[in-house]
């Protein structure tokens, strides 16, 4: 894939990983990867919930490898920087394989090792020298710690994969012991297929202000969302957008555009007219993106203008308004976009601006949604004072 256009690059993944992603036919990030990768690169704690087979492994392996590669942590002898706790031997081996696979393109590759019970501990003790990524089941890890083969005091990143299973299998006590040996300052990444009470419990124990990413099959309850569509001439779109925001007194509104360029343009125009707006899209740094998003979520930014990069995965709770300033390419993206509102059993409103030229495409979207909206005329709306 062309490096400049890889959707993984847009998430902040460096070029070193792109050829292996192409070789593995990872052409597009999965929803959990879309949401998790930028957050992990940014150093955030995350709780990632997505069903089995949704690509959770790469959603942490890629950004963790990149962080490891960039940070060049220098640690004392037998101290590991990256610790992945898993409930089973099978998963340990699987995760080890993915780390080694995805690290292929790095100039310096980390030493990756999986350890688990049921096999002789001696080779594991010897192998622990210079390990950079340790994948372990809790019991065997504690044995290795007790025999001073490995130390956790300098762990930078902790991953708990299949956290739900970890508790089901009765590893609570071992986990508590392991957690007590970790340094306070570290990044925590917790993944699970389900969000159970047990997972909530570890979340409290482990995570620090996590970004919660929950990918569900049905991205939203479409019924909870009131949808309206407006027919607007192209040159009246900007003023009409301001009119909507002002006349409906919107204070937290997500506006979607179809390109980064137009996201910047729309945000600029709004700001110039005194409506505070910022754009997020794939061409902004992760740092800028997450900062803007955090301000928006906290209610400190009135308008967030985004491309479809943002329409999946990232959970913004009960957002009251979404506006499609430009149509998405696919009906699926339309569903994801409007799914940003009306969540958590609260109702929301989704507005779509449709130019005469957009009309055929908007019909296609509605047909796929099996939901038809009356296109409301806007020519009579006075836009002079907005
Ligand atoms: P989970 O941990 O969520 O159950 P895995 O991480 O094991 O899922 O991934 C399931 C499968 O999907 C694996 O075979 C993996 O190689 C593949 N996969 C992961 N991400 C992608 C992607 N972006 N594109 C294509 N295949 C992917
Ligand atoms: Mg998994």
Image (spheres, helix red, strand yellow):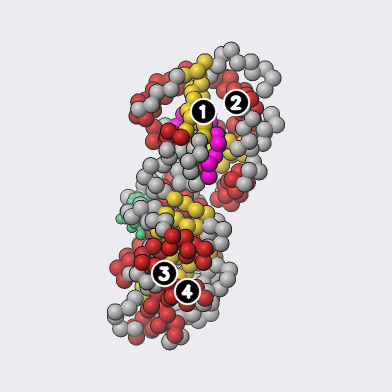
Above or below 162: residue 235: above
Above or below 101: residue 314: above
| Left or right: 7 in relation to 321 | left
User: Would you name the residue on which mark 3 appears?
Assistant: 85
Label 4 to label 3, Cα distance in Å?
12 Å
Looking at this view, is 184 or 277 the one in front?
A: 184
Label 3 to label 2, Cα distance in Å?
49 Å
Mark 3 or mark 1: which comes first in sequence?
Answer: 3
Disc assigned to residue 244: 2
Question: Is there any visible trace of residue 105 in the rendered image?
Answer: no
- Asked where in the image residue 113 lies, by quadrant, the reply is bottom left
Label 2 to label 1, Cα distance in Å?
9 Å
**Can you tell which of label 4 and label 3 is closer to the viewer?**
4
On the image, the x and y values in percent for residue 352 come to 50, 27
**Can you tell which of label 4 and label 2 is closer to the viewer?**
4
> Which residue corresponds to the image point at 42% horizontal and 33% vertical from the top-left?
223
The residue at the far top in this view is: 380
Span shown in magenta:
316-328
On the image, the x and y values in percent for residue 172 come to 42, 72
- Mark 2 vs 1: CB contact within 8 A: yes
User: Would you name the residue on which mark 4 appears?
Assistant: 176
Which image quadrant shows ligand 2? Answer: bottom left
């Amino acid at each position: 894939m062309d490096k400049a256009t890889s959707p993984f690059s847009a998430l902040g993944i460096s070029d070193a990983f792109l050829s292996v992603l192409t070789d593995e036919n990872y052409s597009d990030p999965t929803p959990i990867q879309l949401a998790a990768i930028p957050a992990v690169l940014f150093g955030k704690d995350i709780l990632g919930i997505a069903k089995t087979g949704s690509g959770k492994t790469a959603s942490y392996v890629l950004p963790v490898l990149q962080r490891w590669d960039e940070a060049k942590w220098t640690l004392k002898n037998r101290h590991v920087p990256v610790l992945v706790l898993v409930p089973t031997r099978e998963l340990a081996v699987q995760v080890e394989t993915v780390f080694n696979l995805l690290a292929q393109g790095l100039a310096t590759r980390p030493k990756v090792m999986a350890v688990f019970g049921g096999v002789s501990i001696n080779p594991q003790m010897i192998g622990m020298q210079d390990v950079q990524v340790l994948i372990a089941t809790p019991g065997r890890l504690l044995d290795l710690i007790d025999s001073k083969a490995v130390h956790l005091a300098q762990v930078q990143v902790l991953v708990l994969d299949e956290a739900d299973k970890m508790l089901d299998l009765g590893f609570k006590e071992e986990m508590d012991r392991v957690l007590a040996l970790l340094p306070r300052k570290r990044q925590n990444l917790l993944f699970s297929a389900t969000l159970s009470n047990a997972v909530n419990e570890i979340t409290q124990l482990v995570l620090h202000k996590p970004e919660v990413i929950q990918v569900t099959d049905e991205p939203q309850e479409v019924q909870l969302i009131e949808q309206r569509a407006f027919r607007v001439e192209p040159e009246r779109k900007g003023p009409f957008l301001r009119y909507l925001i002002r006349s409906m007194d919107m204070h937290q509104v997500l506006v979607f555009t179809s390109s980064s360029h137009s996201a910047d343009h729309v945000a600029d125009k709004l700001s110039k007219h005194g409506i505070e707006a910022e754009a997020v899209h794939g061409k902004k740094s992760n740092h800028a993106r997450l900062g803007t998003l955090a301000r928006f979520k906290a209610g400190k930014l009135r308008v967030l203008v985004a491309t479809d990069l943002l329409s999946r995965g990232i959970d913004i709770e009960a957002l009251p308004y979404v506006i499609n300033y430009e149509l998405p390419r696919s009906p699926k993206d339309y569903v994801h976009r409007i799914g940003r509102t009306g969540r958590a059993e609260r109702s929301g409103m989704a507005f779509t601006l449709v130019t005469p030229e957009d009309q055929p495409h908007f019909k296609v979207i509605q047909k796929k949604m099996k939901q038809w909206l009356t296109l409301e005329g806007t020519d009579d709306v006075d836009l002079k004072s907005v």
